[in-house]
Image: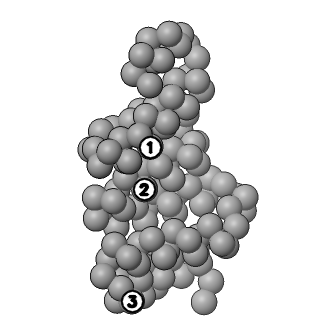
């Protein structure tokens, strides 16, 4: 992905953002979470309304146990998606957070925050 960036014009913000997000996912798989966040930050900077950028950064933050950061990023992604993200997607992400936060206590806290913010319904 790094090589690919050298072939993409600086003015092609959309293509550069896509490559950065692909590289961020590769970093996540290799547990290079700081680098994944940096690449997602770059993609968001290139296309400020990137649902995938905020979602990807949230994944990296969740993996690094930054559940507050993950929550904020996914909330932003959902707001940008304007209803295009279905409930099954949110439930899948909540299940993943549950496994990282130590079970029901962490999940209950996250669900409460999602409900308070209007992202999830009771």
Please rate how many residues cluster around mark 2, counting C-alpha atoms within 10 Å: few if below 14, some from 14 to 19, many from 20. Answer: many
Q: Image point 50% across, 60% down: which residue?
A: 74
Q: Image point 37% across, 52% down: which residue?
A: 60
Q: Nearer the viewer, residue 62 or 117?
A: 62
Q: Nearer the N terminus, badge 1 or badge 3?
A: 1
Please rate how many residues cluster around mark 3, counting C-alpha atoms within 10 Å: few if below 14, some from 14 to 19, many from 20. Answer: few
Q: CA distance from mark 1 to mark 2?
A: 9 Å
Q: Image point 47% across, 49% down: which residue?
A: 56
- Circle number at residue 25: 1
Q: Position of residue 27 (x, y in %)?
A: 35, 41
Q: Nearer the N terminus, badge 3 or badge 2?
A: 2
**Image quadrant where one finds the C terminus:** bottom right
Q: Nearer the N terminus, badge 1 or badge 2?
A: 1
Q: Which residue is mark 2?
A: 59
Q: Are marks 3 and 2 in contact (CB under 8 Å)?
A: no
Q: Image point 72% across, 58% down: which residue?
A: 84
Q: Position of residue 95 (x, y in %)?
A: 48, 76
Q: Is residue 12 visible?
A: yes
Specify whether 80 is left or right of 25.
Answer: right
Q: Secondary structure at mark 1?
A: helix
**Image quadrant where one finds the N terminus:** top left
- Of badges 1 and 2, nearer the viewer stands 1
Please rate how many residues cluster around mark 1, counting C-alpha atoms within 10 Å: few if below 14, some from 14 to 19, many from 20. Answer: many
- Circle number at residue 69: none
Q: Is residue 18 above or below residue 76?
A: above
Q: Which residue is mark 3?
A: 104
Q: Are marks 1 and 2 in contact (CB under 8 Å)?
A: yes
């Amino acid at each position: 992905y790094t090589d690919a960036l050298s072939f993409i014009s600086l003015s092609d913000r959309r293509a550069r953002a896509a490559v950065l997000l692909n590289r961020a996912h590769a970093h996540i798989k290799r547990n290079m979470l700081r680098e994944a966040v940096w690449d997602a930050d770059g993609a968001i900077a290139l296309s400020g309304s990137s649902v995938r950028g905020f979602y990807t950064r949230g994944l990296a933050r969740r993996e690094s146990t930054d559940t507050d950061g993950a929550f904020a990023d996914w909330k932003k992604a959902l707001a940008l998606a304007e209803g295009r993200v279905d409930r099954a997607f949110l439930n899948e992400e909540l299940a993943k957070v549950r496994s990282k936060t130590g079970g029901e206590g962490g999940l209950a806290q996250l669900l409460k925050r999602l409900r308070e913010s209007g992202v999830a319904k009771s």
